[in-house]
């Protein structure tokens, strides 16, 4: 049996397990949005890790907060689409933290620019 046959059978079993065969194209698009959002949101940790390695200490770059905000907004939209109140509140409240951190960073940079 070829590897492609094995992968195809595995994909079919996975689709059956998650009841994906009955999904409409609209639902598949939202599923893709959800996976993309989760990927973007998870990427923030890779960004932070790389920045910390470069700095030689624990460091949270602005990109971390920007990617958190983008991924958080996308995940909140996905959660609202899924009508999941726990997921919506969890991701939605995080957006407040990300925006506030970006505001504090902007305020600090503005103050540093004004003092020089």
Image (cartoon, rainbow, N blue to C red):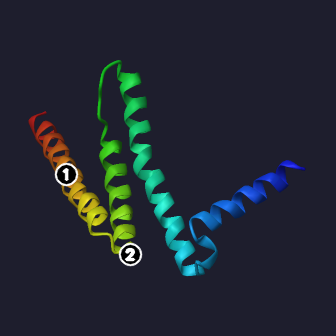
Task: Please tell me which residue lies in front, 63 or 35.
Answer: 35
Q: Position of residue 16 (x, y in %)?
A: 64, 67
Could you tell whether 54 is left or right of 93 in the image? right
Could you tell whether 62 is left or right of 22 in the image? left
SS category of the residue bearing label 2: helix
Q: What residue is shown with label 1?
A: 97
The residue that appears at 33% across and 50% down in the rendered structure is 68
Give the Cα distance between marks 2 and 1: 22 Å
Q: Position of residue 98 (x, y in %)?
A: 24, 51
Task: Please tell me which residue lies in front, 6 or 73.
Answer: 6
Q: Are marks 2 and 1 in contact (CB under 8 Å)?
A: no
> Residue 36 — which label?
none
> Residue 81 — which label?
2
On screen, residue 20 above or below 100: below
The residue that appears at 18% across and 41% down in the rendered structure is 109
User: Disc 2 or 1, which lies upstream in sequence?
Assistant: 2
The residue that appears at 13% across and 46% down in the rendered structure is 107
């Amino acid at each position: 049996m070829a590897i492609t046959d094995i992968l195809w059978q595995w994909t079919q079993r996975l689709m059956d397990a998650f009841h994906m065969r009955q999904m409409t194209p609209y639902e598949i698009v939202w599923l893709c949005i959800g996976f993309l959002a989760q990927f973007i949101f998870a990427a923030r940790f890779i960004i932070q890790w790389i920045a910390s390695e470069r700095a030689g200490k624990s460091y949270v770059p602005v990109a971390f907060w920007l990617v958190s905000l983008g991924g958080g907004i996308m995940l909140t939209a996905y959660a609202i689409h899924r009508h999941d109140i726990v997921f919506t509140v969890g991701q939605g409240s995080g957006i407040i933290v990300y925006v506030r951190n970006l505001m504090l960073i902007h305020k600090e940079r503005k103050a540093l620019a004004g003092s020089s």
